[in-house]
């Protein structure tokens, strides 16, 4: 059970964008240089975040990405599921209805207890990530972090976005 | 984030073995026929469960698999991690220390807050699965289930194991 490598990228990029001044943006090229990750692949992931409403994209020479809503309204779950989807890791293919031990369909109206427990664990995971917003993450950073982030981003060329 | 398809197989096989009389075994071939899954691949997964102590394997013409310890001492987490491993789905590659935004190593002595929150969610998932034993699962089955399971398994040839 693995999350894509880009999960780390998008979590950090969202945290970085949460530190910009209101209305300011950063390009995919700037964010890629900021974290030394491949710009084209990062741009694709950022577009997934836009599609999910986590980020907003603006065009033009000063265009780029910014948060799609306030940091207090974006959870880590929003970011993670924007790139990895919301599908459950455990797939129930109803093998209880197959083979020599097959149960009758009328005995399988309820969800299989194993699928139910696996889904419950996934919900526990989702709840934990839904309980943490980007604002919560920012609150753990040193007070000097946002100014540093903004200054370093501003010194990074926008080209390559 | 996906668990292997065989996760469903091993959860069901462990639940089936938990319904056998003490000392009784079922072969990989019997379990494969019981659920109509590929025997060689299932056998490999069952060996992983043996390695993890979840199952015990006996040899000889009546040999096969049985639980490695009482059903009340085998959790769903034990079964799932026996085949999928215990690695965390989120991999932190410390991109916070890379690129133009790189933090200094001395500012990264603590775990990254994002990695910490992702690990916390994984622990919530693990706790949920660790709270459910095979005995708990059996307790949800109809009272007639164990006798039916044993009769159908007994009627399944052991060959192919």
Image: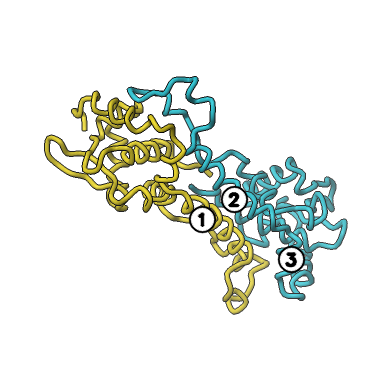
Chain colours: A yellow, B cyan
| First-in-chain label (3 vs 2) | 2
Q: At x 39% / y 51%, what residue is drawn?
A: A78
* Same-chain check, marks 1 and 2: no
Chain ID of residue with mark 3:
B
Q: Residue furthest right?
A: B23
Element marked by disc 2: helix
Are the two marked residues, 3 and 1, in contact with CB atoms closer than 8 angstroms?
Answer: no
| In this rendering, position of residue A148 left or right of residue A56 | right
Element marked by disc 1: helix
Q: Nearer the viewer, residue B30 or A137?
A: A137
Dot label at residue A127: 1
Query: Residue A90 sits in which quadrant?
Result: bottom right
Q: Residue furthest front?
A: A143
Q: At x 64% / y 72%, what residue is drawn?
A: A103
Are the two marked residues, 1 and 2, in contact with CB atoms closer than 8 angstroms?
Answer: yes
Dot label at residue B124: 2
**Residue A86 percent location from the top left of the image:** 43, 55
Q: Nearer the viewer, residue A75 or B150?
A: A75
* Between marks 3 and 2 in the image, the one whose residue lies nearer the viewer: 2
Q: CA distance from mark 3 to mark 1?
A: 27 Å
Q: Nearer the viewer, residue A59 or B129?
A: A59
**Residue B76 percent location from the top left of the image:** 68, 54
**Residue A7 percent location from the top left of the image:** 42, 40
């Amino acid at each position: 059970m693995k999350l894509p490598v880009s999960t780390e990228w998008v979590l950090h990029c969202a945290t970085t964008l949460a530190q910009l001044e209101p209305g300011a943006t950063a390009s995919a090229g700037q964010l890629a240089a900021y974290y030394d990750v491949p710009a084209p692949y990062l741009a694709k992931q950022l577009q997934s975040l836009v599609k999910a409403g986590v980020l907003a994209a603006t065009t033009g020479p000063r265009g780029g990405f910014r948060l799609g809503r306030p940091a207090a309204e974006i959870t880590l779950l929003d970011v993670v599921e924007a790139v990895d989807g919301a599908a459950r890791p455990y797939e129930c293919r109803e093998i209880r209805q197959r083979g020599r031990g097959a149960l009758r369909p009328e005995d399988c109206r309820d969800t299989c207890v194993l699928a139910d427990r696996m889904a419950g664990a996934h919900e526990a995971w989702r709840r934990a990530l839904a309980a943490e917003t980007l604002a919560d993450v920012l609150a753990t950073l040193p007070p000097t972090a946002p100014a540093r982030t903004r200054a370093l981003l501003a010194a990074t060329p926008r080209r390559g976005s």
